[in-house]
Amino acid sequence: MIYPHSKTLLEKFNVRSFRPNFWLQCLFILLLALVIFGPIMNLLIWTVTESWYFPHALPSQWGFKYWQQVFNPYSDVSGSLFTSLLIAVLTVVVCMIVSIPAGYALSKRSMPLRVFWMLLFLIPQAFPNLTVYMNIARLFYDFGLNGTLLGVVIVHSVHGLMFSIWISVAAFSSTDPMLERASRNLGAGPFYTFFHIVLPQAAPGLIASCIFVFLESLDEFTGTFFVGSPNISTLPLLLYTASMEGNYQIASITALILLVPSILFMVIIHKFMKPEMLSKLGK
């Protein structure tokens, strides 16, 4: 039995113990929001800034002058954007041509050296990108691929195959093998079964794989810098050049252009990446 006086003391104790925890939680959420959204807010401010000098906390002059420069038909941004999109699309095509048959084959547990082949696609990620791309640039120079669109697509494809292969294996592993067996038992051939039974089931995972590869290629800087420069100019290279020259407005607008498709595609990935498919990763 708890007396009223004791109950009042307990309530006061709970309130006093709750208040510090509550304010600590609010402080943690505030700091987390500052870390996540602070750089984005600074980026957005720079996109509408015409002049901003120290020690002013906010820009002294606002405007859209640099937006007009970015979307000027004669600016480098429009050409770099088209080149980035073209390279990303070609990279997705190359990766899908390789990863769809490879992912279907590697999804079968009976395939010899299955683990070895899957780990083989992780090797490019096991070493620092800088040293890898420097050596690739040296090899491509002997074959005349430096400064060419083909060379950049090959480099992006090697990097993107890690995502496309592993996600494709998970996508094909999540399909129902009974439907495939039923199709074969009813007299359908292997190609008909694959394109009409297996591939539609794996399509959501393959779409997510395409989006991952597209975003990786769109944001790739190091490989493009060593293999494509100076003939190939993409948005990440333009962003780097503008930031090194101190033109933070152009760099911020370029970064915002790169950020928008990433956010939109991540929403689509969240829709297609199903839990049962994610559980197949690495199996």
Image (spheres, rainbow, N blue to C red):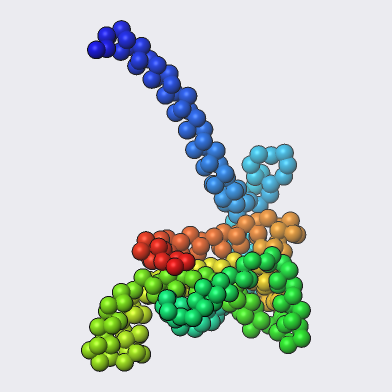
Q: Nearer the viewer, residue 104 or 256?
A: 104
**Spot occupied by residue 206 in the image (x, y as percentages of width and height):** 42, 74
Query: Where residue 283 sits: x, y (%)?
Result: 44, 68
Q: Residue at x 43, y 21 (%)?
A: 17
Which residue of the protein is positioned furthest toward the left in this rendering? Answer: 186
Residue 163 drawn above or below residue 147? above
Q: Is residue 3 above or below residue 267?
A: above
Residue name at image x 35 percent, y 85 percent: 194
Instruction: Judge whether residue 91 can be spotted in this image.
Output: yes
Whether residue 160 is visible to the viewer of this picture, yes or no, is: no
Q: Quadrant of the N terminus?
A: top left
**Which picture quadrant has residue 221?**
bottom right
Q: Quadrant of residue 276?
A: bottom left
Front one among 71 and 103: 103
Outermost residue toward the top in this view:
5
Give the residue drawn at x 74%, y 59%.
244
Image position, residue 183 (x, y; %) = 26, 85
Q: In the image, is 210 to the left or to the right of 69?
A: left
- Is residue 110 or residue 26 the one in the foreground? 110
- Residue for point 62% across, 51% down: 46
96 to the left or right of 133:
left
